[in-house]
Image (tube, rainbow, N blue to C red):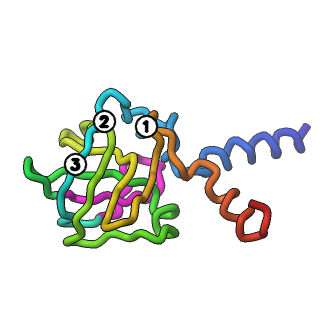
Amino acid sequence: MLLIFVVLGTTVLSGQRGNGGWGQNSNYGRMFSPSTIETLTGSIVAVERIVPESKMSYGLHLKLKTEKGVVSVHLGPTWYLDNQEIQFKEGDKVVVEGSRITFNSAPAIIAIYVEKDDQVLKLRDPSGYPVWNGWRKKGMGRRMGNG
């Protein structure tokens, strides 16, 4: 009985920790709406690492200056983004597609993809499903020659 409890408890906890609160069904992930998808073009004025909600892991946000003002663009968890080829810095010109939300009483975008120069970083599908779900396992498989 104790063994079953330990195994089940570990499975539940690892599932919660697995994406650091960045999954599609988290409170944060449910803010994404396919009906509010839009495309923005602008230049990055700040790159920030923040925790969007309690019990979430750090995430990467861009402050994007557009023709209509500055908007926060939410990319995803830093543990995923730090391992991507494409990186962002102040002054980069980017195109972002994502779902417009209100976050902390201000307009924001949860990004589907970000395009910089000739590179595209895909973050979610059009329904909001994050590409990093299962990424660690897939990445390990590739490194081990299994993927």
Farthest residue to the left: give it: 68
Q: CA distance from mark 1 to mark 2?
A: 8 Å
In the rendered image, the vertical position of residue 125 relative to residue 70, given as above or below = above
Camera-side residue: 65 or 29?
A: 65
Q: 100 left or right of 18?
A: left
Residue 57 inside the magenta-drawn segment: yes
**Label number found at residue 4:** none
Of mark 1 and mark 2, the one earlier in the sequence is: 2
Q: Which residue is mark 1?
A: 126
Q: 105 left or right of 11?
A: left
Graded by Cα atoms within 10 Å as few (under 14), some (14 to 19) or many (20 or more), the crowding at tag 1 reads some
At horizontal 74% and vertical 47% (from top left) the residue drawn is 10
Q: Secondary structure at mark 1?
A: loop
Q: Are marks 1 and 2 in contact (CB under 8 Å)?
A: yes
Q: Which residue is mark 2?
A: 37
Camera-side residue: 43 or 133?
A: 43
* Image coords of residue 22 (percent x, y): 48, 47
**What range is drawn magenta here?**
48-64
